[in-house]
Image (spheres, grey):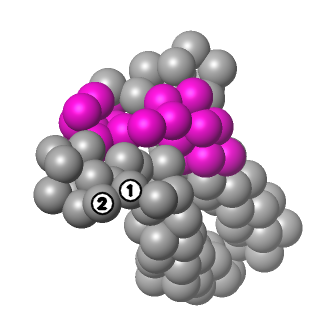
């Protein structure tokens, strides 16, 4: 099961980080992004972290088959949510301030 996530996250990381396909990011709106390449790099790096974490869980599963469920559970319920939260808060610096763009707030 974990090998599926390795491939999924690696392919998504490649498409976003190296091919610049930010349009496949859920909720992506070009009008709200001020640094498209920075966002692509940031999201791509976080997907690489997930792919490597899944790879480590898979290696652990191979070395110790009796704990396959535990390795996947740790990956799915601990690592993925932590990286997701880091991604959510970290991507804010790549988003444009919507209020300033609409002229609702003064700029310095």
- Residue 29: within the magenta? yes
Residue furthest right in the image: 63
Q: Position of residue 93 (x, y in %)?
A: 51, 57
Tell me: residue 48, above or below residue 78: above
Numbered disc 2: secondary structure: loop
Q: Is residue 19 left or right of residue 52?
A: left
Tell me: residue 78, above or below residue 108: below
Residue furthest top in the image: 19
Residues 41 and 30: in front is 30
Residues 77 and 22: in front is 22
Tell me whether circle 1 and circle 2 mark residues in contact (CB < 8 Å). Answer: yes
- Residue 59: within the magenta? no
Numbered disc 1: secondary structure: loop
Between the residue at mark 1 and the residue at mark 2, the CA separation in whole angstroms equals 4 Å
Residues 34 and 38: in front is 34
Q: How many marks?
A: 2
Instruction: Report the residue marked by disc 2.
Output: 106
Q: Main secondary structure of the magenta part?
A: helix
| Quadrant in the picture for residue 63 | bottom right
Is residue 3 at least partly visible in the picture? no
Residue in the image at 41% along x and 28% along y: 22
Label 1 Cα neighbours within 10 Å, binned few <14 / some 14-19 / many ≥20 = few
Question: Which region shows up in magenta?
Answer: 24-45
Q: Position of residue 49 (x, y in %)?
A: 69, 56
Q: Is residue 83 left or right of residue 88?
A: right
Identify the mark at residue 55; answer none if there is no mark. Answer: none
Instruction: Report the residue marked by disc 1.
Output: 107
Q: Position of residue 20 (x, y in %)?
A: 52, 19
Residue in the image at 61% along x and 47% along y: 42
């Amino acid at each position: 099961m974990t090998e599926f996530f390795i491939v999924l996250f690696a392919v998504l990381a490649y498409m976003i980080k190296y091919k610049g396909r930010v349009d496949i990011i859920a909720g992506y709106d070009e009008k709200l992004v001020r640094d498209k390449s920075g966002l692509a790099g940031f999201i791509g790096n976080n997907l690489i972290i997930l792919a490597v974490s899944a790879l480590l869980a898979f290696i652990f599963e191979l070395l110790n088959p009796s704990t396959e469920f535990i390795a996947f559970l740790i990956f799915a319920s601990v690592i993925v949510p932590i990286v997701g939260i880091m991604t959510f808060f970290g991507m804010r610096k790549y988003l444009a301030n919507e209020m300033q763009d609409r002229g609702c707030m003064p700029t310095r």
